[in-house]
């Protein structure tokens, strides 16, 4: 059952009520699976980088959620999440350039990351609203 539809139209009470958080976690897992087939010599470089940055998006969103009653702290963590989202775009493009990730798969990941980025931007624009619900 897709709970994201149920979540729309009501206030989030927990970080995992946020569609962007669920989307970020799902993407991090998909990138984990995709990176398992990359060359062994990339384990401590590209594989670690793409996994770390993609996982950090959700982690930064969770930290932001914990700081939402303080607008400036909340916004700062959301900006960090946005930066990690953009870093992940860089790493998947690097994987494509190295022929570890097919172009169509890279584009699919990019599209998901763009949606996440827009959702984070929307949260930044409405930071005060999140602060009021804390």
Image (tube, rainbow, N blue to C red):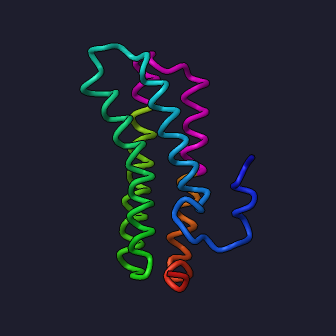
Using the rendered view, name the quadrant where residue 5 is placed: bottom right
Q: Main secondary structure of the magenta part?
A: helix
Q: Position of residue 103 (x, y in %)?
A: 56, 23
Any magenta on residue 92?
Answer: no
Q: How many marks?
A: 0
Using the rendered view, name the quadrant where residue 66 is placed: bottom left
Horizontal side of 130 relative to 32 (left or right) equals: right
* Residue at x-position 56% and y-position 76%: 126
Q: Position of residue 105 (x, y in %)?
A: 58, 26
Q: Position of residue 120 (x, y in %)?
A: 52, 61
* Residue at x-position 53% and y-position 40%: 27
* Residue at x-position 46% and y-position 23%: 96
* Residue at x-position 44% and y-position 56%: 82
Give the residues in magenta: 93-115
Q: Residue furthest bottom?
A: 132
Q: Nearer the viewer, residue 114 or 60?
A: 60
Residue 126 sits above or below residue 61 on the image: below
Q: Position of residue 20 (x, y in %)?
A: 57, 56
Residue 90 sits above or below residue 127 on the image: above
Any magenta on residue 112?
Answer: yes
Q: Residue furthest front?
A: 1
């Amino acid at each position: 059952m897709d709970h994201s539809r149920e979540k729309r139209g009501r206030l989030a009470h927990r970080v995992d009520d946020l569609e962007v958080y669920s989307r970020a976690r799902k993407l991090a897992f998909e990138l984990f699976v995709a990176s398992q087939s990359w060359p062994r010599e990339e384990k401590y470089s590209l594989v670690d980088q793409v996994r770390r940055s993609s996982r950090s998006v959700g982690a930064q969103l969770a930290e932001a959620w914990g700081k939402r009653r303080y607008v400036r702290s909340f916004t700062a963590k959301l900006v960090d999440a946005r930066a990690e989202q953009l870093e992940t775009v860089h790493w998947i493009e690097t994987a494509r350039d190295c022929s570890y990730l097919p172009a169509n798969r890279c584009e699919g990941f990019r599209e998901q990351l763009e949606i996440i980025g827009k959702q984070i931007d929307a949260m930044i624009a409405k930071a005060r609203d999140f602060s009021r619900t804390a």
